[in-house]
Amino acid sequence: EPVIPDILLTEVSPPDEKGFCSFGQSLWNKRQQVKEAKLVIAEVNENLIRTFGDNFVHVSELDYLVEHTPSSRQLGAGSLAGRKLEEPPPYLKRIAENVSQLIKDGDTIQIGVGRTTEPLTRLGMLNGKNDIGYHSEATPPGIISLVRQGIITGKRKTLNPGKVVVTSLGGGSREEMEWASNNPLFWLVDVGYLEDPRVIAAHDNMVTINNALTMDLTGQITAESVGPRVISSAGGQIAFVVGAWLSKGGRAITVLPSTARDGTVS
């Protein structure tokens, strides 16, 4: 059974004139937690960006408000897993080129968290594409820039057209995050809605792009462990793959380098 929190601590923006606070750049399941928790304590940070979608909570739903404003907004570029943004290895450029051939104008894409998938947009995976849609957990480095360039528009999305639908914004530079603040193009929704395979499948031409850690000779992959060693917890990869299978014109893409340890192991 799910664990229901007794006390929820969360961060919100100052309330607007109607009393609504924003959860900022990261929603996940906070709306649901606010409904379930016995006591809700919110830290009010005036530097928190405001975003649209299902990303608001009314002050009447908060039991206590504590004001705390850092000296500046902590908005820096980096990976979705919190790693420092580094120059991608050369082999990822070839992977980006291969994946690019599988993406068509008007497709809606999802990009999973990982060292192989996240750099692909910065390496030209979507260069020359038109009206790409985006429905994914978060925005790895390069995504917000592609929205600004007009490559990601969502105009042809069959669900939530014209919106970049995520549950968390991240990976952008400070300038990009400032641009995303109060921008109605970005729509933050509950992770339960975002990762519902039925919602994913409702997008025609849904293309999911995720990592694998290992693959056996039959084509089976692992994305969370290597042998008995657990590398990461379970995420939304299975939901997105199933959704892509069920999508009209959908494709599920798994990326995996053919070698490891700087090309010494294959």
Image: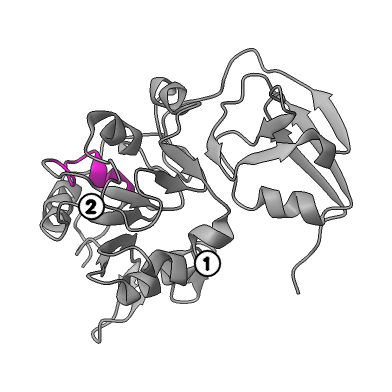
| In the image: residue 23, left or right of residue 198 | right
Range of residues picked out in magenta = 118-127
Q: Residue 262 has which mark?
A: 2
Q: Residue 260 has which mark?
A: none
Helix, strand or loop at mark 1: loop
| In the image: residue 230, left or right of residue 144 | right
Look at the image and name its color scheme: one colour
Q: Earlier in the sequence, mark 1 or mark 2?
A: 1
Residue 84, above or below 166 = above
Closest to the camera, between mark 1 and mark 2, is 1
Q: Nearer the viewer, residue 222 or 261?
A: 222
Q: Is residue 224 visible?
A: no
Q: The disc labelled 1 sits on which kind of residue?
A: Ala
Q: Is residue 102 visible?
A: yes
Looking at this view, name the residue that lies furthest to the front: 18
In the rendered structure, does residue 125 fall within the stretch colored magenta?
yes
Give the crowd class for mark 2: few <14, some 14-19, many >=20 residues within 10 Å: few
Identified at 45% across, 71% down, the residue is 198
Count every numbered label the image shows and give the total. 2
Looking at this view, name the residue that lies furthest to the bottom: 218
Residue 48, position as x, y percentages in the image: 61, 25
| In the image: residue 93, left or right of residue 185 | left
Identified at 28% across, 65% down, the residue is 204
Residue 165, position as x, y percentages in the image: 43, 48
- Classified by dominant secondary structure, the portion drawn in magenta counts as loop
The part of the image, by quadrant, that contains residue 147 is top left
The part of the image, by quadrant, that contains residue 146 is top left
Identified at 35% across, 66% down, the residue is 213
In the rendered structure, does residue 144 fall within the stretch colored magenta?
no
Q: Residue 234 has which mark?
A: 1
